[in-house]
Amino acid sequence: DAKTTQPPSMDCAEGRAANLPCNHSTISGNEYVYWYRQIHSQGPQYIIHGLKNNETNEMASLIITEDRKSSTLILPHATLRDTAVYYCIVSAFGNEKLTFGTGTRLTIIP
Amino acid sequence: EADIYQTPRYLVIGTGKKITLECSQTMGHDKMYWYQQDPGMELHLIHYSYGVNSTEKGDLSSESTVSRIRTEHFPLTLESARPSHTSQYLCASSEDLGGNSPLHFGNGTRLTVT
């Protein structure tokens, strides 16, 4: 299954848009891109996922490049509660052994 | 939104004790998972299940065992706890929709073995 690469850490000012990049250059055609976040020691929280098209929900937007080799998670108006570790993973049918990696530690600065 | 519950939230226990970590979900999800996570480290899949009577081992070798007698219940058991088992254990579930199925996680059990 495809692996992902994310920057280890990022800062973003409160109220600004947080743009978190993810590289998945070996993604295959049937693999979805998923984003989760983990706040402190809680269980990871699902944010959004997509296959080819850009997606938006009440939490965030997901922009997937046309070649699907990278994506960006956008938190449009970051708040202090968005401080967390953000994981980008890829997943396909039959692949139960999802690799979460180390993610990006996003810190929202007041 | 999926509801998935883990108990206890925190557990401190002595070496050699048998323990069972409980995980239940109310969404009727077929797939369930157990992850292990040390503080500040990656999540590692230790067990998963496709449905009733199905259990599989994950990537990380674990001395724990699991059972899936009912769809909603996926307990994890350690027959003889050791200090090396000290970690956070996270349970998750998902629908069986191929790759188009998000994982829903519980809040975990933080286990300390003294």
Image (cartoon, rainbow, N blue to C red):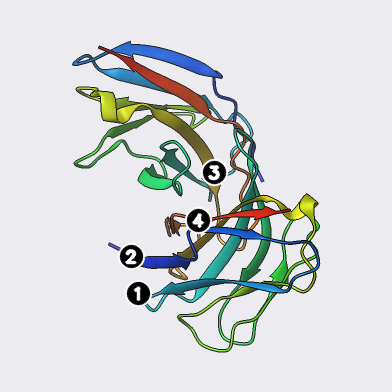
- Label drawn at residue B2: 2
Label 1 to label 4: alpha-carbon separation: 18 Å
Query: Which mark sits nearer the N-terminus, 1 or 2?
Result: 2
Please say if B64 is above or below A85. below
* Residue at (63, 39) in percent of width and height: B42
Give the quarter of the image for residue A20.
Answer: top left
Residue A5 % position (x, y): 59, 26
- Residue with the mark numbered 4: B108
- Which amino acid, mark 1? Met
- Which amino acid, mark 2? Ala
Q: Is residue A18 left or right of residue A38?
A: left
Badge 3 element: strand
- Residue with the mark numbered 1: B27
Badge 1 element: loop
Label 1 to label 2: alpha-carbon separation: 6 Å
The chain under label 1 reads B
* Residue at (26, 34) in percent of width and height: A60
Which of the two residues, A9 or B8, is positioned nearer the viewer here? B8
Query: Which mark sits nearer the N-terminus, 1 or 4?
Result: 1
Please say if A73 is above or below A12. below
Give a yes or no on whether discs 4 and 3 share a subunit: no
Question: Are the residues at dot 1 and dot 2 in contact (C-beta closer than 8 Å)?
Answer: yes
Which of the two residues, A96 or A94, is positioned nearer the viewer here? A96
Badge 2 element: loop
- Label drawn at residue A90: 3
Crowd band around label 2 with a 10 angstrom C-alpha radius: few (<14), some (14–19), many (20+): some
